[in-house]
Image: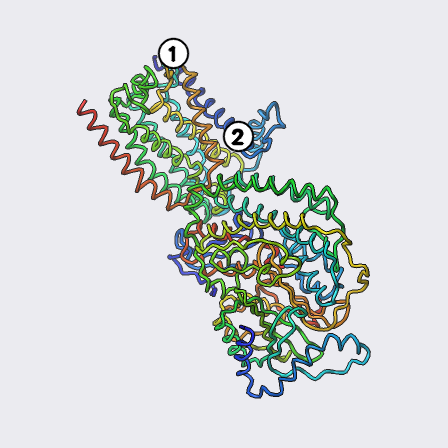
Amino acid sequence: MSSPIQLQPDETFVLNVGPQHPATHGVLRVKMEMNGEYIVNAETVIGYIHRMHEKMGENKTYPQYLMNLSRMDYLGAMGYSHGHVLVVEKASGIEVPERAEYIRAIMVELNRISSHLFWFGAFVMDLGGFSPLMYALQDREHILDMLEAVTGSRLTYCYFRFGGLYNDVDDEFVDAARRFIPRMRKSLIKYEKLVTGNIIFRKRLEGNALLSKETCRKYGATSAVARGSGINYDVRKNEPYSVYPEFDFDVPVYHEGDSLARYMVRMDEIEQSLRIIEQGLDKLPDGPIMPAKKPKLIKPPAGDYYQAVETARGNFGVRLVSDGTKIPYRLKLRSPTFSNMHLFDETCRGMMIMDALAFMGSLDLVIPEIDR
Amino acid sequence: MIIEKIKLAFQDLFPVAEPEVSAPEEKAEEPEETKTKKKVKTKKPPRLNGVIECNYTVHGYHLDVQVDADQLLDAVSIVDQAEFFIESITGVDWIKEDQIEIVYDFSRYDFDTCRVVIRTRVNRSSPVVPTITDIYAGANWHERETHDFFGIKFDGHPHLIPLLLPEDADFHPLLKDFKA
Amino acid sequence: MSLTLLNVIIAVVIAIAFAALNAAYLVWAERRGAARIQRRPGPNINGPFGLLQPPLDGIKLMAKQLIIPGGVDKILFIAAPVLAMFPAIMSFVTIPFSDTIVAKNMDVGILMIFAFASMGGMSLLFAGWSSRNKYAMMSSIRAVSQAVAYEIPMLITTITVVMIAGSMNLMEIVHQQSSSILHWNIFPLLGNSHNLLMPFSFLIFFVCTLAETNRAPFDLGEAESELVAGFHTEYGSMGFGLFFMGEYANIVIGSCMTTILFLGGWGCPFGLFPGVWWFLLKLYILIATIIWIRWTFPRTTIYGLLNLSWKILIPLSLFNLLFTAGLIKVF
C-alpha cells in the first residue's frame, strides 16, 4: 500500500525520478523519499500518457476500435488485438477459420519475441551494458520486417479482424519465419554467453527485489513477474484460447523470485515462443482466412463478456458489456503492467536506488500500456 | 472442484438462497432470448443478489456474484481465503437505472480454473462502497482508477487522489452523462 | 636539460596539445570502437573514417551557450570543469615518454601525479555540490567515496613498485625494467624482486585506474540510467566538454602510469629499439582494453564497488606489499 510522502526535514529528501528519466523508459514518475542512496518510501505517479481508450471504446463501433488496441502497447501490440477480437467473436458467435487462428498464434508469438528482445536490450542498458541492446534490436529487426511484409506496419498493427485476418501470409513469410528460428536460437546462445553468464550482471540481479507468491497474488501480478516467483500461471495454459491447446510448449517457472528469475523466465519464453512458431508453421492448414459469411455488422447480444489472453507483458483482459447495439456499452481493458507496476512502491522500500531501478527494469514496463 | 466450493461459500452470504436457484436457467437462456425476441423487449426485473454459475465459453467467467455494498468485504474475503488474485476493478454506469455497478474480477493461479466476478450496485447520487485495499493491497490503484473514471468513493481508501487523470481533475469521464 | 622559460612554454604547449588531441581523438576512437562492438558504422560522415568528427564536436560545444542555472554556487560551478581538466594536463609534465621526451624529470614524479589525481575528485565534488541538483549531488558523493576507496589500493600497489625500484623517479623506475619483458614489474623474474604476485598487483592497479577515472564498469558517478548524467547533469557547452575531455585525459594518464610502473615504459619486450613508439603502443593497447571493457560489461553497484575495494583489493595489495618487502629483505 502506498501512502502519501511527507517530507521530513533534515533527514530525507524527495527525489523525482521521472517523468523524463532514462530509467523509466517513458513518462513514468516515481516520487522517492530518499535517505542517502536508500529509498524510504516511494510513490509511483502514472497517467502522463493517459488517452482514455476506454471512453473511446464507448464512442466507436467495434471495427473502428480495432486500431486502438495496438496503440496501447507499442512493443507487443499483436497480443492486445488478439484479446479484443477474441472477446467480440465470443460475444457475437463468429467462427474463425482454422488457418486464421494459426496465423494469429504465429503472429502473436513473433510479436512476443520482438517485445522480449527489446526488453532484454533495454534491461541490460538499465544495468549499464550498452551493446546487447544493439544485438537485440538487430534480431528484432528481422521480426519487424516479416511482420511489416504481412501486416503493413512495424509496430502498431491493425491486422486482426473479427472473424479472421486482414491479409493472408505468403510463402515468403513462411520461409522467412523458418529461417528466423535457427538464427534466433543461435542468438539466444550468444546472449547467454554475453549477458547471462556475466558475473557483474548476476551479482546485481541475484537476490534483487524478492517477490513472494503472496505479494504477487495480492497485487495480481502476472507474466514473468509471477512466473519468476514460482507461480505456474500462463493464460495460454491455464485457460487455453485460440489454438494454443494444439501446441506443445512449456511455461518456464523459476522459484527464486528475484530479478534474475524474471530475466530467466523471459529469456526462456523466447525459446518457447520459437517452439510454438515452429509447430504453427508445420501445422499451418490451408483454407480461407475469413469466414465464408463475413460479419457485416458486429452487434453482440446484450450481456457481459470477459476474455483474458497472455500478452508479452502478462494477463491482458477485456471486459465487454454490450447492450446489443453496434457500439459497446462499456469496454474495460485490464492491462497487466498496471498490476505489475503497482508492486514497485511496496517492494522498493529499503532498497538502494540502483537496485530499485534494476527491479523496475525487470518488470518490463511499457508506459502507454499502464496509462491506457 | 473450486467452483463448487466457492459457490457454497458464497451461498452463506445470502440467507434466502432458495429463490436464486431459478436464476441460472434464466441467465443461461438470455443470449438466445435476446436474439429471438429482439422486437418484444420486455423490461427485465432488476437482478437480485446472489450467485449465478455462468457458461464459461460464452461469458469467460465461471461465477457471477452480486452483493450489496456492505456485503462486499465478506465476499472479497471469501475469494481471498481461496487464494484468488485480483485481476481488476471497474465500473459500469447504468444511467437508465440510476445506478453504478462496480465489478471486481478475481482469478486463480493454478489449473483449477475459476474466474469470479463480484458486482455491487450503488446509487448514482451517492456512490460509496467500502475499500478492499485492506484485503488486497493491489486494489489500491484499481480503486483509484475507478474513482477517477466514475467518481465512486471508496470508503477507507488510504490515498484516494486521481491516478490516471490530472491531479486537479474533478470530472469523471466514463459516466454516461459526461460531456467533454 | 636547462629550465629556461622557452623550454617551459614549449613543454606546456606540447602537454596541452597532447592531452587535448588524445582526449578528442579518444572520443572518436571510443565511438568507433563502440560502433564496431555493436555492429554499426559509428561516426563516418565527417572526413575519412569520420576523423573530422572531434574538431566539429569541439566547435559545436564551444558555440553553445554556457548555461548557468539559477541558484547554483557560481564560483564552484565554473571552477569545477577547469579543475577537472587542469590536473590532467599538469600530470603530463612529469610523465616520461622516452629517455629524452620528458618535460620535467622530477625525483618525486609519482607523488606529483598522485597529488594531481586526487584533485580530480575535488572537481567532481565541486560540480555535484554547486549544481543544486539532487542527482548531481548523489553522483558526486558516490564519485568521492569511490575515489577515496580506490586511491588506497592504488597507492599501496604503487609503493610496492617504488620499493622494488628504490626510487620515486619515473625515469628510474623505467630504467630498472628496460632490459627485457622478464624485467618488467608485471613478470619480475629477472628484476630486483622475484615476486610472483606482481601480476595481481598489475590487475589491482589496472582496476583501480578504471575506478579512479570513473570508467565502466565503475562509472557510478555518471550512471545515466540512475542519475541521469551524474555530476555534469547541469553542465552544457564547454563546461561539459571539459569534463568529457578531462575524463579521457585521465584515462591517458592512468594508462601511462600503468605502462611506466608495470609494463616497462618505452622498453621493448626483447630489449630492441627502445623508444617512444613502444610506449605509445603499450599505452594505446591499454586504452583499447579500457574501451573494450566499457562496451562489454554492465555497471556494478555502489556497494559492490566499495566492497571490492575495502574487502578485497586493499587486503590483497597490503599482503603483496608485505610479501615484496620480505622478498627484498631476503634476497
Residue position marked by numbered label 2 in the rendering: C33
When the figure is inspected, residue A2 is found, relative to residue A99, above or below; the finding is below
Find the distance from the CA under tag 1 to the CA under tag 2.
31 Å
| Residue at point 80%, 64% (across, down) | A297
Residue B97 in view, yes or no: yes
A160, A322: nearer the viewer: A160
At label 1, the amino acid type is: Leu
Neighbourhood count class around disc 2 (C-alpha, 10 Å): few under 14, some 14–19, many 20 upward? many
B20, A341: nearer the viewer: B20
Which of the labelled discs sits on residue C272, or is there none? Answer: 1
| Residue B53 place in picture, x, y as percent | 62, 76
At label 2, the amino acid type is: Gly
| Residue C180 place in picture, x, y as percent | 33, 16
The image quadrant of residue A51 is bottom right
Q: Tag 2, which secondary structure?
A: helix
C246, C151: nearer the viewer: C151
When the figure is inspected, residue A257 is found, relative to residue C305, above or below; the finding is below
Q: Quadrant of the N terminus of chain C?
A: top left
The image quadrant of residue A35 is bottom left
